[in-house]
Image (spheres, rainbow, N blue to C red):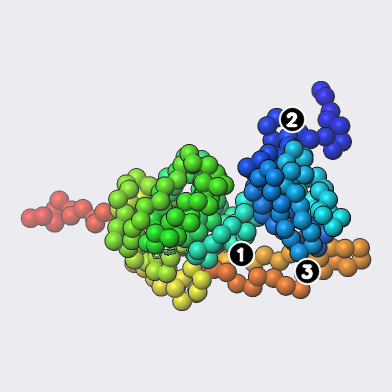
Amino acid sequence: MTVPEPGAAPSGDRATLQAGERVLLIDAKARRYLVTLRPGTDFHTHVGIVAHDDVIGAPEGATILGSTGRRFIVLRPTLADVVLKMPRGAQVIYPKDLGAILIEADVGPGVRVLEAGVGSGALSMALVRAGADVVGYELRPDFAQRARSNVVAELGDDASWRVELRDVYDGIDERGLDRVVLDLPEPWRVLPHAATAMRPGGIVCAYLPTINQTAQLRAALDAGPYGMARTVEVLHRTWHIEDRSVRPDHRMVGHTGFITTARLLVPEAPPMPRADAAS
Ligand code: SAH
């Protein structure tokens, strides 16, 4: 077995950073800049200028010197980095909630998902990256366009994802879906459509900012052909770990949203009339 030298770049196409790729530059104060590499171009930060040509051809993880001698670490961004840095129309779902939605809604390779609304496309990217086939419904053309450019920039043109400009409250055309994932204000209005569009056993998942909306959704789920309803919120607390100072960070994102899921059930058939009761 050949053991790579310590610090050696991996072999293959991704060994070095290429023109056209998106990279993350991180300065000494941990500020992050998302940059698309273009030959002959400079990236200006208030702590100095970085020549793209110094980054192109460097291995991922390298330290690049800026014009003022400041150092920048260069890495390919993670999906979480991209979501927090990409152009947004609508508010995106935070990475901590994206991760939870994938598990709560049990999204994996080949799973057929209807997503509404699409917004900036953050959840779309997480769903497609998990291997799902995704159809998105979005009301606003500007958001649909933004989502499309975000998804294509991250996952390429051939991603198993498309967006349709339409109101999901009016109905869902797809049939035999495995999942319906909702990030819009009144998900209870989608439940009757989801019950027709999904196969039994499918999961509906809704992300809501307030508990009032969540309670209304839960009541609607109780009144429909759904079961196993469950609501979770994700509290995410990072820690400061430095020498003898080991404690939670002072700041955290206190609230984002509630994630509710339920399974589509087959309605129980009414009891058969007994033969001897017929006469
Ligand atoms: N989950 C997205 C953000 C969605 S924001 C992300 O991670 O980026 C909510 C979106 O729902 C908005 O873009 C809004 O235009 C859309 N929307 C609201 N009501 C809708 C409806 N009835 N049908 C389709 N889209 C709707």
Left or right: 219, with 231 as reference point: left
Q: Amino acid at mark 3?
A: Pro
Q: 50 or 135: which is nearer to us?
A: 50
User: Mark 2: few, some, or many residues within 10 Å (few <14, many ≥20)?
Assistant: few
Q: Amino acid at mark 2?
A: Ser
Residues marked 3 and 2 touching at CB (< 8 Å)? no
Query: Going by the picture, which residue comes out furthest to the bottom?
Result: 212
Q: Earlier in the sequence, mark 3 or mark 1?
A: 1
Q: CA distance from mark 1 to mark 2?
A: 38 Å
Indicate the secondary structure of the residue bearing disc 2: loop
Q: Which residue is tagged 1?
A: 234
Left or right: 3, with 33 as reference point: right
Q: CA distance from mark 3 to mark 2?
A: 39 Å
Query: Going by the picture, which residue comes out furthest to the right?
Result: 244
Q: Which residue is tagged 3?
A: 248
Q: Earlier in the sequence, mark 3 or mark 2?
A: 2
Disc ID at residue 11: 2
Q: Amino acid at mark 1?
A: Val
Ligand 1 within 8 Å of disc 1? The answer is no
Left or right: 264, with 105 as reference point: left
The residue drawn where x is 39% and y is 69% is: 186
Q: Residue 105: where, in percent of width, then height?
A: 50, 53
Q: Residue 112 lies in what quarter of the image?
A: top left
Q: Residue 97: where, in percent of width, then height?
A: 58, 60
Q: CA distance from mark 3 to mark 1?
A: 16 Å
Q: Residue 201: where, in percent of width, then height?
A: 40, 49
**Quadrant field for ligand 1:** bottom left
- Examine the rendered structure and indicate whether residue 213 appears above or below residue 239: below
Query: Going by the picture, which residue comes out furthest to the left?
Result: 279
Which of discs 3 and 2 lies nearer the camera? The answer is 2
Q: Which quadrant does the C terminus fall into?
A: bottom left
